[in-house]
Image (cartoon, grey):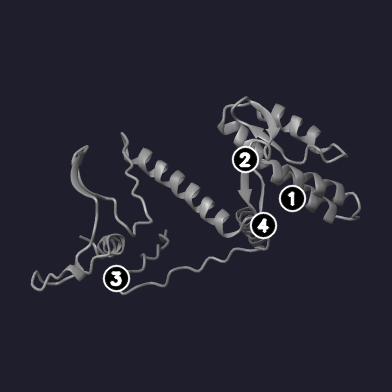
């Protein structure tokens, strides 16, 4: 058994890891309600349930292909990390592309107060934020142009009643994401926008590419120099 699994089992059952079978006193023996070995697919697994100190759960993923299992693993990992972040930071914003559309609207209005080329930069940043609801619509098989037009109309409401409207993948429409409990932690959204902005700034700052040729090694023989034929 790997050391990580052994330590996890020790914490869950309250048992102490022993290197010998001698001197097995009650103080080093763990407690569990049920220990069983089950056949799942082509593998056999040991399941220990009813541990007094257990605070974890095991998820077994099965699929018809390796790519499906990897995709399921990535999706579950992302969902767990979002929940973990939400428990640490209780501030949330509307999901489904709602916060991106609201920030995009604000930047478009702010750009009109700025002169010069910076107005174009801010407008481009605002347009880039609309990629999130557009991609959500495309992934769900919706008409992304129609969904974005509805979102722009809602977020342009001066009363602010539509600021939390995002993509509704259940009804192929838009909805109030806060009313439907579609939330995203603020820290996750800040980190994603910050990372994307830094990556874009890094690419834009590259003005020249320098290619350093590989120095010839001991096994590299120079190519023969062609000589002209005399007449």
Q: Are marks 4 and 1 in contact (CB under 8 Å)?
A: yes
> Under tag 1, what secondary structure?
helix
At 17% from the left edge and 68% from the top edge, which residue is drawn? 26
Which badge, 1 or 2, is on the more N-terminal residue? 1
Which badge, 4 or 3, is on the more N-terminal residue? 4
Q: Are marks 2 and 3 in contact (CB under 8 Å)?
A: no
CA distance for labels 4 and 2 = 25 Å
Which badge, 4 or 2, is on the more N-terminal residue? 2
Which residue is under mark 3? 219
Which residue is under mark 1? 125
At 29% from the left edge and 63% from the top edge, which residue is drawn? 4
Which residue is under mark 2? 182
Which badge, 2 or 3, is on the more N-terminal residue? 2
Which residue is under mark 4? 197
Which badge, 1 or 3, is on the more N-terminal residue? 1
Q: Are marks 4 and 2 in contact (CB under 8 Å)?
A: no
Count residues near mark 1 (Cα–Cα under 10 Å), then give few for <14, some for 14-19, many for 20+: some
Q: Is residue 159 above or below residue 83?
A: above
CA distance for labels 1 and 2 = 24 Å
> Under tag 3, what secondary structure?
loop
Count residues near mark 2 (Cα–Cα under 10 Å), then give few for <14, some for 14-19, many for 20+: some
């Amino acid at each position: 058994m790997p050391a990580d699994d052994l330590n996890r089992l020790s914490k869950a059952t309250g048992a102490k890891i022993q290197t010998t079978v001698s001197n097995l006193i009650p103080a080093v023996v763990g407690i569990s309600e049920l220990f069983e070995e089950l056949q799942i697919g082509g593998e056999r697994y040991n399941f220990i349930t009813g541990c007094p100190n257990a605070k974890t759960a095991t998820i077994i993923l099965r699929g018809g292909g390796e790519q499906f299992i990897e995709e399921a693993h990535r999706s579950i990992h992302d969902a767990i990390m979002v929940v973990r972040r939400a428990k640490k930071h209780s501030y949330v914003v509307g999901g489904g592309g709602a916060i991106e559309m609201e920030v995009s609207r604000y930047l478009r209005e702010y750009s009109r107060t700025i002169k010069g080329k910076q107005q174009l930069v801010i407008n481009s940043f605002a347009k880039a934020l609309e990629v999130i609801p557009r991609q959500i619509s495309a992934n769900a098989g919706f008409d992304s142009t129609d969904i974005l037009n509805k979102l722009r109309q809602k977020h342009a409401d001066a009363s602010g009643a539509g600021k939390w409207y995002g993509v509704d993948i259940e009804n192929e429409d838009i909805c109030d994401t806060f009313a439907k409990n579609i939330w995203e932690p603020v820290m996750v959204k800040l980190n994603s926008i910050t990372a994307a902005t830094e990556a874009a700034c890094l690419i834009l700052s590259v003005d020249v590419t320098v290619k350093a040729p590989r120095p010839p090694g001991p096994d590299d023989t120079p190519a023969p120099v062609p000589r002209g034929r005399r007449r």
